[in-house]
Image: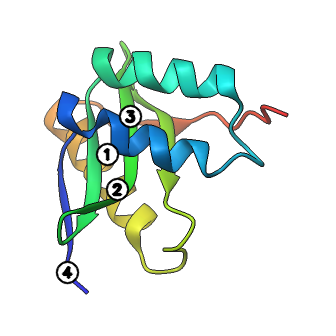
Amino acid sequence: MNIVIEELKPVHISSIISIARNLYEWITENAIKQIKEDAKRYPGYIARISYEVVGFIILDERECCVEIKWLAVKRDYPGRGIGTLLVKKAKDYACRKGKNILTIKNLWWK
């Protein structure tokens, strides 16, 4: 299985929204609206296998750190290292931006 990590682009937004919608136990409709807005505003990456988007991460560069705003992997792809690769890419991004802290906030939406 060849997992490719690439920059999040507007063409990927419908795919990441589909992933988020399918994680309905954790992600509400309000959160989905926020993900859609954040995907347009903040940098991020998608993971794909062949042409299928299977995960995403959206980042926010802060004064002292880079924050992971959203991270999700498609329901059918757990335990394959996709989330790990996305976090590694976020770490690389933070380092390139001169930030030595990568943070994430965990909120329960429901």
The residue labelled by disc 4 is 2
Q: Pointers 4 and 2 in contact (CB under 8 A)?
A: no
Q: Pointers 3 and 1 in contact (CB under 8 A)?
A: no
Q: Quadrant of residue 110?
A: top right
Q: Pointers 2 and 1 in contact (CB under 8 A)?
A: yes
Amino acid identity at mark 3? Ile
Q: Residues within 10 Å of mark 1 (few under 14, many from 20)?
A: many
Front residue (pair 109, 107):
109
- Classify residue 69 as left or right of residue 55: right
Residue 10 location in percent, x, y?
Answer: 21, 28
In this view, 88 is above or below 66: below
In this view, 92 is above or below 54: above
The residue labelled by disc 1 is 90
Residue 9 visible within the image:
no
Q: Pointers 3 and 2 in contact (CB under 8 A)?
A: no
Q: Which mark is residue 86?
A: 2
The residue labelled by disc 3 is 58
Q: Residues within 10 Å of mark 4 (few under 14, many from 20)?
A: few
Amino acid identity at mark 2? Leu
